[in-house]
Image: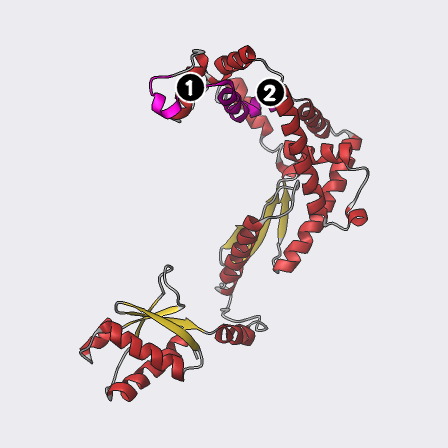
Amino acid sequence: MSIQKTLSQNIKLAFKTLYNLELETVEFQATRKEFEGDITVVTFPMLRVIKMNPAQLGDDLGNYLVNNVDEVKGFNVVKGFLNIVITDAFFLNFFNTIKDNETFGFVTPEPNGKAIMVEYSSPNTNKPLHLGHIRNNLLGYSVSEILKASGKTVYKTQIINDRGIHICKSMLAWQRFGNGETPESTGLKGDKLVGNYYVKFEQEFQKEYKEWLDSKSNDEINKISNSYLKMKNIDDPITNALIETIALKTDSIKNKSLFGKVNVTMLKALIKDKFKDEYFNNYSKIAEEAQIMLRKWEAGDEATVTLWKTMNQWVYDGFEITYKNLGVDFDKLYYESDTYLLGKEFVAEGLKTGVFI
């Protein structure tokens, strides 16, 4: 029996017991998220049957349900709305009755129905799955199963982002600092181990960046500010005002209440935030090594590809453990390493003809 039917029967019985009146229907709605409760009874329509304060009516019914219905453990009343809290036991018992029924809610598949592809997860292979992936996986899998239950043909798929500079960051850091460790030697899931080296790369890059920034004189900082930040089209007016101040090499701007004096610490903080990508692409030594590794991978360098395959497999094995624990699966896997060159000739033609720049 549904919880609505159980509550409806007992609320009608409460009316008979408490007021010696007959109630024909009970109106339910979802409990608003700011209130405690799992389901809400609207008491206003009941005022046609009994003339009384709707909040008092809610209290009377709530107390009756708590004292007489096993499925109800609490309630609160907000004006004319009775918010009912259902026991955990009810939900557990309900799920236990259906969890082993593989055809629960299913209908006969549509003959020659249109197939639907649902993509979810689709992670990078340089770090573990995180909380956002759990949400994404459970939503994707649930949507797929609901569509299948409605009779649709469904293909569950993901495209795995297994190439690119982010992958090379983890590979390079493992080469530099890994000392040959593996998931087996460390006892870590493979995706966690590889993720540790992605973090290690970022730590080393930030250390290098800080050392580079600290080595610059005040005049050099001003010069960098002027040549780089001044020409950037930044929407934020506060940042633009700071950039203008820096570029003019003055120590104040019109609105002193916002900024006051601009000192070297502020300049360096702004440069550190805005210049990081430029530094990574054109100045960083460790980033240059990662870029060289990426070009080797794209050129098919045997040692680089072998390392890539090894570390990616560690990640796949770790992902598989997570997917199994979540209870999700896939019908088809696509890999960016197999597809990233598709369409390259069209891009080249577009560049040649001026369609692209």
Whether the magenta-drawn stretch holds residue 276 is answered as yes
| Quadrant housing residue 84 | bottom left
Q: What's the magenta region?
A: 253-281
Residue topped by disc 2: 213
Residue found at x 78% / y 47%: 186
Is 94 a magenta residue? no
Q: Which mark is residue 193?
A: none
| Mark whose residue sits in front, 2 or 1 | 1
In this rendering, the answer to whether 339 lies above or below 122 is: above
Principal secondary structure, stretch drawn in magenta? helix
Image x and y of residue 141, in percent:
55, 57
Q: Which one is earlier in the sequence, the residue at label 2 or at label 1?
A: 2
Q: Are marks 2 and 1 in contact (CB under 8 Å)?
A: no
Under mark 1, the amino acid is Lys
For image coordinates 40% across by 27% down, the residue present is 236
**Badge 2: residue crowd in 10 Å (few <14, some 14–19, many ≥20):** some
Q: Residue at x 37, y 80 (%)?
A: 65
Residue 322 % position (x, y): 65, 54
Compared to residue 176, the image places residue 191 above or below, namely below
| Residue located beneath label 1 in the image | 261
235 left or right of 48 in image: right
- Residue 230 or residue 169, whichever sits in front: 230
